[in-house]
Image (tube, rainbow, N blue to C red):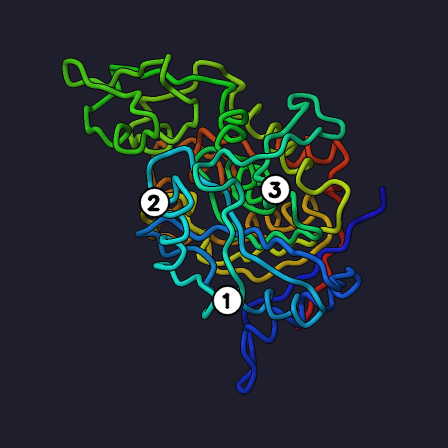
Amino acid sequence: MEKAKVYFTDFRVPVGTNLQQKLKKLCIKAGIKNINFEGKFVAIKMHFGELGNLAFIRPQYVKVIADLVKELGGMPFLTDCNTLYPGSRKHALEHIECANLNGFNFQTTGCQIIIGDGLRGTDEVEVPVKNGEYIKTAKIGRAVMDADVFISLAHFKGHEMTGFGGAIKNIGMGCGSRAGKMDQHSSGKVSVDESLCRGCRRCAKECGSGAITYEGGKAHINHDICKGCGRCIGACAFDAISNDQWDAGDLLDRKMAEYAQAVCQDRPCFHINMALDISPNCDCHGENDAPILPNIGMFASFDPVAIDQACVDACQKQTPIRNSQLGDNLAKPDWKLHHDHFMDSNPNVHWKETLEHAEKIGMGTREYELITMK
């Protein structure tokens, strides 16, 4: 397979121009006009951010993409699917209200919001996965699959379970219905090492299924209720919680890649990654810790694997921010250095498996040519 083209620009602009104009120029240079948008429904998949989180993409960037799609004759809408955990996006009414409170509405973005899997997270389409090894039929939000053209607009960041969140996670996990998210998370259950548990109850606050109780000041997990989503692992500051199944993280990454394949196969797709406010954890958190790396820039490509690989490579070249989760870990005298910013920020993560498996099933290539636009 020949190298994919990934287009990149940083956040520098001269006086008299702005970043919105630069993003539009980047998308045009990357070839978005080669897609036939005329009269087509266009899903712009993004993450509206949990209430309390401020790291998500600003609505002004979203409006650039929506306006460009309309300029090219398309009919755009913003979309995401409901969450497994309680939060503020567990059903469509809350989800739209959360989006509005975080600044996403028709007035700010120029297009409507449609929650992909409906009111209760059950409006889904079962999509056969080409070359799927773990998922034969993916459960994808119906509105996502009803669109003629698909655009991923992702905030590239760290992640407590998958190492990073970029295009593939935005698509694969984000477009799964509630049952689809269960499907991806069901590879492993978690257990508590009582000798390390401090009884702080942070894990129970993060648990989306009420599976964690406390006995004798120690956390206990009911495996009959546990969804295996791994949020408690990211919440525990004392490494007291881990997967029972050693390769659960690997399997999550591979299943997520196969879900992304189901969404993208057989229709025009375009991908944009915004590498800024690179928080250590997902925007699903009701808070965002300080960025672990400096702002890098904007990436655009037709290849979701290549764009994520390019973002990873760009991140690994950056100097960590000292006052951050990553910086704090690296400053510990007994820290076991991974020489990998994502693993040094969240040491239990897997991320390479996502890109390797996505390439294996034919979603794209990790080999890319980076074309820089000033």
| Residue 286 visible, this orientation | yes
Where residue 64 sits: x, y (%)? 58, 69
Element marked by disc 3: helix
Amino acid type of disc 3? Ile
Of residue 117 and residue 279, the one placed in the foreground of this image is 117
| Mark found first going from the N terminus, 3 or 1 | 1
Q: What is the C-alpha distance between the residues marked 2 and 3?
A: 23 Å
User: Which corner quadrant holds the C terminus?
Assistant: bottom right
**Residue at the image position 49 percent from the left and 33 percent from the top:** 122
**Residue at the image position 51 percent from the left and 60 percent from the top:** 112
Q: Which mark is residue 168?
A: 3
| Mark found first going from the N terminus, 2 or 3 | 2
Element marked by disc 1: helix
Q: What is the C-alpha distance between the residues marked 3 and 1?
A: 23 Å
The answer to the question of whether label 2 and label 1 lie on touching residues, with beta carbons closer than 8 A, is: no
Of residue 369 and residue 178, the one placed in the foreground of this image is 178
Left or right: where does residue 362 sit relative to residue 285?
right
Left or right: where does residue 31 sit relative to residue 340?
right
Q: Residues within 10 Å of mark 2 (few under 14, many from 20)?
A: many
Element marked by disc 2: loop
Amino acid type of disc 1? Thr
* Residue where numbered disc 1 is placed: 109
Q: Quadrant of residue 243?
A: top left
**Furthest-left residue in view?**
216
Above or below 67: residue 80? above
Q: Nearer the viewer, mark 3 or mark 1?
A: 1
Amino acid type of disc 2? Ser
| Residue 280 visible, this orientation | no
Above or below 90: residue 152? below
* Residue where numbered disc 2 is placed: 88
Q: Quadrant of residue 84?
A: top left
